[in-house]
Image (spheres, rainbow, N blue to C red):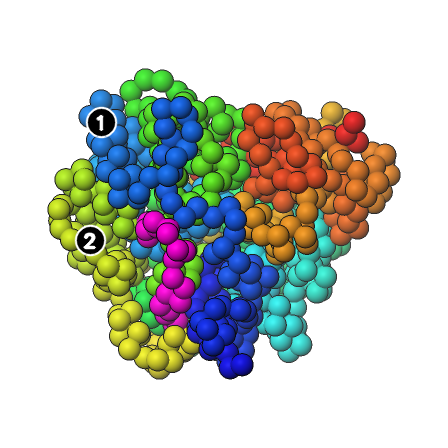
Amino acid sequence: MNAIRKHVICRSCHAQCGLIVDFDESGRPIATHGNKYNPAYAGYSCIRGRELLNYHSFSTRLTRSLKRDSDGELAPIGWRDAARDVAEKLSAIAEQHGPESIAIYIGTFGYNTFPAQAFALALMEAIRSPKIFTSVTIDQPGKGISGALHGKWLAGGYRHPEWDGLMLVGTNPIVSMNGGLGMNPAKNLHAALKRGMKLIVIDPRVTDVAKKAHIHLQCRPGCDAAILACIARQIIEEDLYDKAFLREEVEGFSALKETLAPFTPDVVAKLAGVPAEQLVEAARLYGSFKKADISCGTGANMSGFGNAAEYMSKVILTLIGHWRRAGELKRNVGVFIEGFPAIAAGSGSIPAWGFGTKLRVRGLEESISGLPTAALADELLTPGAGQIKALLVLGGNPMLAWPDQIKTYEAMQALDLLVCFDPRLSKTGQLADYVIAPKIHYETHGTTALNEFIGNFGGGWGYEEPYAQVCDPILETPEDSDLCEEFEFFHAMAGAMNLNLSVKTKAIINPEKAELHRTVFPAGGPQPDPLEAWDATLNGSPVSHREVRNDPEAFEGKVLGRQAEIVAPKPDDWSTKLNIGHPAMLDELTEVAKQLDSDQDSTEFPYRLISRRLKEIHNSNWHESNLQRKRMPHLPAYMHPDDMLDVGVTAGDIVKIESARAAITCVAVEAADVRRGCLSVPHAWGVNPDENDDPLGAGGNTGRLSFNDRDFDKRSGIPIMSAIPVKIERAS
């Protein structure tokens, strides 16, 4: 039997790996695996990608959209009828309560459906509602905020083939595919270590990368900002910084040095629970690197002072001068996304908040990372002018992803209209008025534009070379199904509301230039086909996706023959510099310093719950897979064996985990790689608050343990979602 091979882009997460699907002679798909000849991924694939064929046929998959009927039950509805229904209801809500009463939440998977996001934003603009919320502000909002205040080095930093050092803070790229190690992280890490790269890891767990580290600071959770401040202070104290680079390209050094004074190794060691000598060793090692990087993950962003942690990571990079210099090569000049100009210069600080859209609760407003999603539940519940009455959910599952699940549940029930786009009936979909069933993965066209796009904003993403891959649908939709692509639904709604859609390109980073590359779809006009949707989404790209599609090799993944740029020196009249002493960030560091004298121990809640990612499950997704559930049958609570002994539980026991907010149940799993005093629990599991916890199945939702309105960041609104104070006992 001769297998037929088709190439495709995996869209189960942001990594967008290049995969091969084998078909038998009858045209039936039989296997999925990585492509060892792919120049970016080199055969890498994860268990979720290899399971994608089954994802298309899960028993839980919706093949038709659903509408809640007069009896309160969800019944099938054609997606075009649903689009007209939703459009009519949105128009009525906007007329009665104003356009700002309509909001959208774009979750993690909403970014993987790239045209869907572009068309969704165009619809919100046409409605004249600025109420756009995303997963960014409950994930890693500190990246955008700190980057804006620090400024961007336009030539960019160095990539993993060039590094002699790397520091990872609260991230595990082997699982998350984030952290700068490219698209085959385990292989690339092995290669880097073999050639002599040194690795520093800051993490309460002995993660996959921590096992390889030359220095592992296994700290108390929530101390990342203080540790990084200590390392920066020590680099300055020992004269390890690049004086010439600071003199020419940096401002704010004196103010920074003064603010860092309290963060001595002895004091920070006591706070973080690590040896002072290890802090000094980490500073000296990092100070010895010539070309290196630092990457912070969700651990550093979700456990408090995420802005400060992200800012200090950039400060340390700048102190050492780990930025690409004039005359060096910038190899990735972009394919689908136009990057920043290759100039050896800092952009200077730009505003990180105060963009005009303000919420009605807690003084929160829009930051450069977006509107604070953690406050959205309050916006739904707080009566009066500006109350959100309708919510569209694209590629997300708020009931399992947002903090404060109890309040989120109340908020969802308070809505006049809740519409979810989801291939299955999620915990949020169970509460929805409409659940729109979309085409997924192998049923749609794709490009690697997303990975390029986020590579301009988040360290560790993107490609080292001008790599591109495209794919066409390789599977038909299920028989007797009625499915749409999300962009089609948004276009149909706009037509029913008699609104023109002006789709803003995502191919151009410069906002003024991007405005010149809008694509207008007039009300009542024909529905664009998928390639026309991609045309609009990538209008003005350095290389047209249609041009790439004309190259047969690009369907297998290809490094395009685009000439590398030589980094240009900064012009003589260039005035802006990188800012390592921005007053707002130094104020946050001052707040961090107040921790240094505080008692970190609590007799009532003596443990700290930290979140984690799993290879088998991606957030709230993949729980439907029988294979995955065999590997991960229930929600695990990973505990150090000595803590288990103290609590009086053994492996396999059901434990009750209680915070000041609520309690959940999980199954105890012995894990010597977890720091004592911590337990590690995956996020985005569980059931709704009106359902009984199922500890031997879905388990509890860690979001139920958090308050959304306590200990929150005043800029992004993100509350403590990791390092949550809890107590543990054996469940009865």
- Label 2, secondary structure: give it: loop
Residue 272 x/y as whole percent: 70, 44
Indicate whether residue 466 is drawn in magenta. Answer: yes
Give 141 or 84, whichever is nearer the viewer.
Answer: 84
Circle number at residue 92: 1
Q: Say whether residue 44 is left or right of residue 9.
A: right
What residue type is disc 1 on? Ala
Q: Say whether residue 648 is left or right of residue 545.
A: right
Q: Main secondary structure of the magenta part?
A: loop
Q: Residue at x 62, y 75 (%)?
A: 191
Q: Say whether residue 104 is left or right of residue 614.
A: left
What residue type is disc 2 on? Gln
Q: Residue at x 36, y 18 (%)?
A: 383
Total labels: the figure holds 2
Residue 321 x/y as whole percent: 50, 64
In the rendered image, which quarter is residue 31 located in? bottom right
User: Is the residue under label 1 in contact with that under label 2 (CB below 8 Å)?
Assistant: no
Residue 9 x/y as whole percent: 44, 66
Residue carrying label 2 = 527
Circle 2 packing at 10 Å, graded few (<14), some (14-19), many (20+), is some
Q: Which residues are magenta?
A: 460-486
